Amino acid sequence: MSNILYFETLDSTQTYLKEHFSQLDDKTVVVADQQTAGRGRFDRKWVSQLGGLYFSILLKPNKTDFLANLTQLMALSICQAAEKYGIEPTLKWPNDVQVNGKKLCGILSEAVAKNGHITCLVLGVGINVAQKDLSHVGQPAISLCELGVKTSKQDFLQEVLALFFQRYRAVLEEGFSIIRPAYKERFPYAGKQITIKNGAHVLCGVAHDLSPRGTLLLQTDSGKQEILIGDLLV
C-alpha cells in the first residue's frame, strides 16, 4: 500500500506535494485533518472543516497519455467505496460525486512540469465524511455521516485507495475505456437537458454520451459537440 503521511493542519495537501515531490516516492499520500488554504477546480476555495477527509496522492507515471482520466477513476473509486455502505452515489461529469443531487466530494488534479515534460501528477481529494452541518460551504453538500454511514476517515481512505490502485495501471495504459461502462452506470444525465459552463462560455444541449476518451458528447442546436472541460449544470 502507499506511503501515507498524516498532518493535523496543512495549508493544502496539494501544495505540500507540489513543493516536496522531488523528495517523495511515487504513490505517496498526504492527509490533513484540516486545510487552511484548500482549493478545488478552477482555483475555487474548498472549505476544509474538521470531519472531512482531505488527501492528495503523488503520482509519477511513466506514461502520461491518459492523466486526465485519473480524476474520473478516483471519482468512480469513491462511488464504489460509498456503495459498500448501502448508499447510491452518482457521478456528475467530469469528476464530482453526488448523493441526492448534493456534493459528497470534489477532486482536483495538477500536473508538475519541468522543461516541457510532465514530472508528476498531484491528485487531490476532499470527501465529506463526518461533518454534520455543511450549510456554509456555498453549494448543496452532504456527508457520509448525514447519510447514516458509520466509518472512520482512515478506513474509508484505505477502501478508496485500494479501489483506485486496482485499476490505476490499466487506466494509465488504456485510458477511460477501461472504466467507461462502470462510470456510465453512475452517470444519470444521459438524455437530459444540461448546461456546460466554462468561464464566461455557456453551452446548452442534451447530454448524449461519454466518449471513450472520457469527454462529454453534447447534442446542441448546431450539432453534436465534444466537451473537454467545464462545469455541468442542470
Image: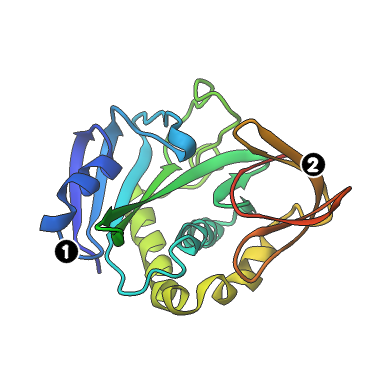
* Residue 140 in the image: above or below residue 97: above
Contact check, label 2 and label 1, Cβ < 8 Å = no
Q: Among all residues in the image, which is located at the extreme left?
A: 23
Residue placed most toward the observer, 171 or 198: 198
Quick one: label 2 or label 1, which is nearer the N terminus? 1
Residue at image coords 29%, 53%: 112
**In which quadrant is the N terminus drawn?**
bottom left
Mark toward the viewer: 2 or 1: 2
Give the residue displayed 79% in from the left and 41% down from the top. 204
Q: How is the image coloured?
A: rainbow
Q: Is residue 134 above or below residue 105?
A: above
Q: Is residue 234 visible?
A: no
Q: Secondary structure at mark 1?
A: loop
Q: Which residue is mark 2?
A: 204
The Cα–Cα distance between marks 2 and 1, rounded to whole angstroms, is: 43 Å
- Residue 139: horizontal and vertical position, in percent? 58, 28
Q: Position of residue 39 (x, y in %)?
A: 39, 34
What residue appears at the point 43 percent right and 34 percent down from the top-left corner?
A: 43
Three-letter code for the amino acid on which mark 1 is drawn: Asp
Q: Which residue is mark 1?
A: 25
